[in-house]
Amino acid sequence: MELSYKTAEKVLQAAKEKALFLNIPVSIAVVDAGGHPVALARLDSVYGVIDFAIKKARTAAMFGINSDVMGDIISETGINGYGMLNSNDGILTIAGGIVLQNAEGKIIGAVGSSGGTPEQDKEIAEAGAHAIA
């Protein structure tokens, strides 16, 4: 199963509900496995975090791991961080990008949240991912 709009909407709705419950104005992006946007919500967040949400989601989808894990890999291995961070039109390696998988465990996309603390963004994105788990 590829990421349909209906599934992306379910992810987005669950993440939005979590953000509203926490009273955090975030932007939330859902992307397909190629990192292409499928659904987006801006909950009265500042403009700059829209791009952050998309980049966190794209990072998770394109590398197949949550965005904060990618950040750990870059910092722990000594990989040229500048080159990595500027690849693929820019990636973002802080918490808030969560991989989405289908029932068979295949990566079908990712959800990204930005506007809260990294921990809050991760919690919001995880709520979206759990909606289809």
Image (tube, rainbow, N blue to C red):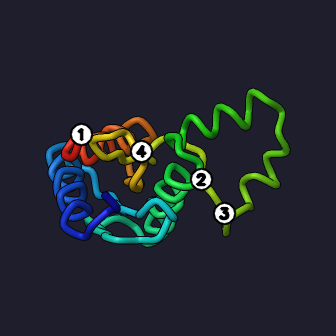
First of labels 3, 4 by sequence position:
3
Q: Position of residue 43 (x, y in %)?
A: 26, 65
Which residue bears the numbered disc 1? 133
49 left or right of 131 in image: right
Query: Please, is residue 29 above or below residue 94 in the view?
Result: below
Who's the residue at 73% across and 61% down the image? 87
Secondary structure category for the residue under label 1:
loop
Who's the residue at 36% across and 48% down the image? 100
Query: Please, is residue 45 above or below residue 110 in the view?
Result: below
**Comparing marks 1 and 3, which lies closer to the viewer?**
1
Query: Residue 98, which numbered label?
Result: 4
**Comparing marks 4 and 2, which lies closer to the viewer?**
4
First of labels 1, 3 by sequence position:
3
Secondary structure category for the residue under label 2:
loop
First of labels 4, 2 by sequence position:
2
Who's the residue at 74% across and 61% down the image? 86
Q: CA distance from mark 3 to mark 4?
A: 17 Å
Mark 1 surroundings within 10 Å by alpha-carbon count, few (fewer than 14), some (14 through 19), many (20 or more): few
First of labels 1, 4 by sequence position:
4
Secondary structure category for the residue under label 4:
strand
Query: Please, is residue 30 above or below residue 22 in the view?
Result: below
Which residue bears the numbered disc 3? 90
Name the amino acid, label 4: Ile
First of labels 1, 2 by sequence position:
2
**Comparing marks 1 and 4, which lies closer to the viewer?**
1
Which residue bears the numbered disc 2? 92
Name the amino acid, label 3: Gly
Residue 112 visible (yes or no): no
